[in-house]
Amino acid sequence: MSSSLESSFFRYTKFKILHKILIPRGETMFNFKKRQSNIKSNQQPNKRVLKSNKKVIYLAGGCFWGVEGYFKKLPGVYETEVGYANGKTDNTDYSKISATEHAETVKVCYDKSRISLEEILLHYFRIIDPLSVNRQGNDIGRQYRTGVYYEDDFDPAKSFNSASDIASANDSSSASDTASANDSSSGSDSGSDLKIIDKIFAYEEELHGPIAVEKSALKNFIKAEDYHQDYLDKNPGGYCHIDISLSSKPLFSEKYTMPSDDELIDMLDNTAYNVMRKSSTEAPSSSPLNEEFRHGIYVDKITGEPLFCSADKFNAGCGWPSFSKPITTDKLTEHVDTSHMMVRTEVVSKNSNSHLGHVFDDGPIEKGGLRYCINGAALRFVPYEKMDEEGYSDYKIFCCE
């Protein structure tokens, strides 16, 4: 065999071996790359939303065209539907809502493993004028009032009580697990949701004083006409009273300085530098943060940017700090990692572009089913009582009941 043919033969053989090892069984290279792009773009196909992770909240914020357009852009929101809510009758349509006093409302279906209700409500208050009565932008009338409506269906018996409950929730391959805005499993635990809503309302009233936003259980929600559904998708450049581009911008105005590499060498110990800049892994159980369970937040050791919250931390027994989700959806990027003959999802701190660890789908079901397995060397813990002093006051709402 000639050297060129031999070289080609070994390259082909190596490719086939690596393909079998790295590409999951039953997937083509095309499908695998498509799945990679889904991970990188932080999108999640509807069919992959576990029934136990489906949640819903109803938001009235003026003309529902723009409100729906905004929330469709958020990672973790898997479906939306516009309609009319909390009026005086069980039936209405667009021509009658002035008389029936329904509010133009968006049903937001979200995956709690990817985005929290706190973050959704902070986005909501970002795009409305919470002091305005029966008006948002140029739209005036009762139908344009603001309101947060929750499904009042809390049933303690629906909580996870057995291994069979958990196994059933984990069965994402069943046909019933396909995401649907009309799926009865897309409910809300109104007991815990109302606590979160109260907490966010108190936070906003500290900022603005008394607000004019309704807060109540959902009543009389009627799906709007097809013409109104996905309006801005069908009519790009159509009327919109809000700035939808805000959906891709950080919730809080913050600036984080990235030191030079020379400065990082002096700033970080060897373990932290190797983890964050060279994508290495610290020894299991070597970080004191693995056993840290006080209230507070975990920030990027380089920039100080908040990444995780104590409310989402759990003991995974793996030897590394583990979290169910990032503190907000704008803090991390995820990338397919095929190193060490494995296919994993790498987690990177967005602003410092630093390796943090990996995310796996073997986390506790009651926390959403994900496990962000993070190197403690890449994090710094800020106790709750020190958060004001260190400039993290806005993040306190994420780590307290």
Image (tube, rainbow, N blue to C red):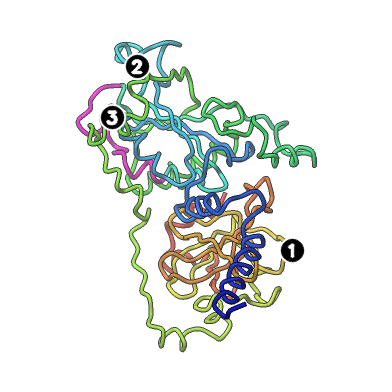
- In the rendered structure, which amino acid carries the disc numbered 3? Val
Image point (70%, 74%), residue name: 284
Which residue position holds label 1?
317
Residue 196 vs residue 278, the one in the foreground:
278
Count of labels in the image? 3
- Tell me where the magenta segment starts and ends, as one range: 122-142
Mark closest to the chain's N terminus, 3 or 1: 3
Q: Nearer the viewer, mark 2 or mark 3?
A: 2
Image coordinates for residue 91, horizontal then vertical, percent? 42, 10
Report the quarter where the N terminus lies. Answer: bottom right
Question: Which label was assigned to residue 133?
Answer: 3
Q: Nearer the viewer, mark 3 or mark 1?
A: 1
Image point (43%, 64%), residue name: 350
Look at the numbered disc 2 and give the secondary structure of its residue. Answer: loop
- In the rendered structure, which amino acid carries the disc numbered 2? Glu
Mark closest to the chain's N terminus, 2 or 1: 2
User: Around disc 2, counting alpha carbons within 10 Å, would you say few (fewer than 14), some (14 to 19), or many (20 or more)?
Assistant: many
Residue 213 vs residue 179, the one in the foreground:
179
Question: Which label was assigned to residue 247?
Answer: none
Q: Is residue 80 above or below residue 200?
A: above
Which residue position holds label 2?
101
User: Around disc 1, counting alpha carbons within 10 Å, would you say few (fewer than 14), some (14 to 19), or many (20 or more)?
Assistant: few
